Image (cartoon, rainbow, N blue to C red):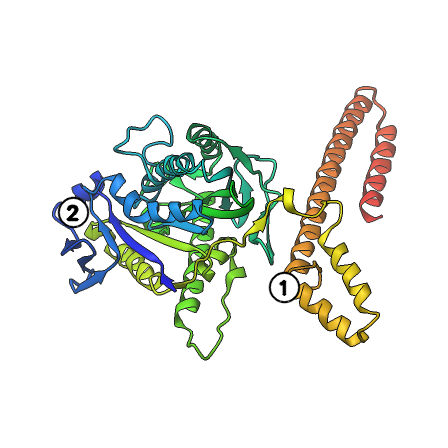
Amino acid sequence: MSNVTVCARFRPRSSRELRDHRDGVCVRGIDAGTFVFQDDKEDELTFSLDGVFYEDSPQAAVYEFLALPIMRDAVNAINGTIITYGQTGAGKTYSMEGPGIQDCDDHNKGLLPRVVDGMFGQISSSKDIANYTVKLSMVEIYMEKVRDLLDLSKGNIQIKETKTQGILLSGVTEVPVSDSAEALQHLCTGLANRAVGETQMNMSSSRSHCVYLFTIQQDSVKDKRVKTGKLILLDLAGSEKADKTGAEGRVLEEAKTINKSLSALGNVINALTSGSSSKVNHIPYRDSKLTRILQDALGGNSRMALLCCCSPSTSNASETLSTLRFGMRAKHIKASPRASEVKIAKSQEEPSSVTKDEKCGRILEKMKERMSNEDIKMLEEVLIHEGIISSLDSMDEVESAYEDIVSKTIQSLQLAVEELQLKVKKLETENKGLKEKALRNDEPGLVGKLSSFISSWYASFFTS
């Protein structure tokens, strides 16, 4: 088992911090992984993490230490997750993207473009031993809805779970990408659709959690075997205090939802790291869309790295301390990453016209001739449990199916309400026109009759 890799990164102080607190710095470095933090009460706390990056640390150093090992493993079918976490305005999006995904010099490129370049570089050097297929998906979690950033018509993606694939986003757009330039172009398209807003802490504050998902399929040239790895990069929206950000109205509601999902993430990490070995704790993955999507990564079947982005200014000491404590807690998560299940390529499988369920059904029918009904039932349950045949009896699949039905029902009802509202507006307009026409013709009796008829029809329409 391995631990989550946790690093801290301290951005340069902003012009506002320099103006209000010229000499106020709450961090003093000791070595590559240890530093001293001074809190609001001027108490000194020592933190030891896997790595620490200061304002003069280059972007390349963060990538090589934090992301490069995980990217290499993902190409070799071991799932990986890279997360940026911290207070709003602490440098998460800059660390993830740099000044921009495209048209950015090599020195300032963030983790995301470097991961893309490195991934296709490694794939190119491995073409002799395997053929690779890479698919890109991109979603944001905004106001507790999962939105497809590559297809805005998909505004409420459902999160499902299967025995073989784990957590997946049902119906999400998966774009095949063949090289780095093509992947970056699609990423730019998705980022243009992301929800952002202005606060007093940040001119372009992320109002959603942004998830970049790469699915890398490896087809071995030698033995015709297929392996799949998933690489997730997650740029979290920052935790906020309304008195510092000046958030009001819609922006304030966004901040509340962001803080609630980050709190749910903290609760999951606490549950994962506080339970005893003799007692199985409930892990509240379903408390938010964020923790549900991260269930595989937090649950252990993934390598994971966390970059805690912080302000070094004393004006943000309490938020920085909270971020660092979150990182220290996450560092104790135990992971058991493993390569994906190896499958024989389709060319060596039985004809696709015969499904796995049909094959198992024929076997069970033959066994019935020599086995009792109880033995057959037990065998069937074992096959379902192992994922060899499918069943909708599991609670996760039933719940997913239920969520789909509820979502479709709500959407159809919303459309029906919109149509009714349009009809009502049209009738009101026609009614107004008839009144005006009748008044011009000096026919008050007719007006009264028409108004009475329309009012009674309107009432009966909505009570029927």
Give me the residue at 21% from left, 38% from top. 15
The label nearer to you, 1 versus 2, is: 1
Q: Is residue 196 left or right of residue 341?
A: left
On-image quarter of the N terminus = bottom left
The answer, for residue 8, to whether it is visible in the render is yes
Residue type at tag 2: His
Residue 88 visible, this orientation: no
How far from the left and from the top, in percent, is residue 189? 48, 30
Circle 1: element type: loop
Quadrant for residue 321, please give it. Answer: bottom left
- Identify the residue at image location x=76%, y=34%: 423
276 up-or-down from 403: above or below: below
Q: Residues within 10 Å of mark 2 (few under 14, many from 20)?
A: some
Residue lying at the far top in this picture: please name it.
441
At x 44%, y 59%, the residue is 298
Dot 1 or dot 2: first in sequence order is 2
* Residue under label 2: 21
Q: Residue 459: x percent and y percent?
A: 81, 44
The span from disc 1 to disc 2 (Cα, nearest Å) is 60 Å
Marks 2 and 1: in contact by CB < 8 Å?
no
Q: Residue furthest left?
A: 23
Residue placed under numbered mark 1 in the picture: 386
Bin the neighbour count of mark 1 within 10 Å (Cα to Cα): few under 14, some 14-19, many 20 and up: few
Tell me: 119 left or right of 36. Answer: right
For the residue marked with disc 1, what is the amino acid? Answer: Glu
Q: Residue 133's mark?
A: none
The x and y percentages for residue 373 are 81, 74
Residue at position x 51%, y 70% in the image: 282
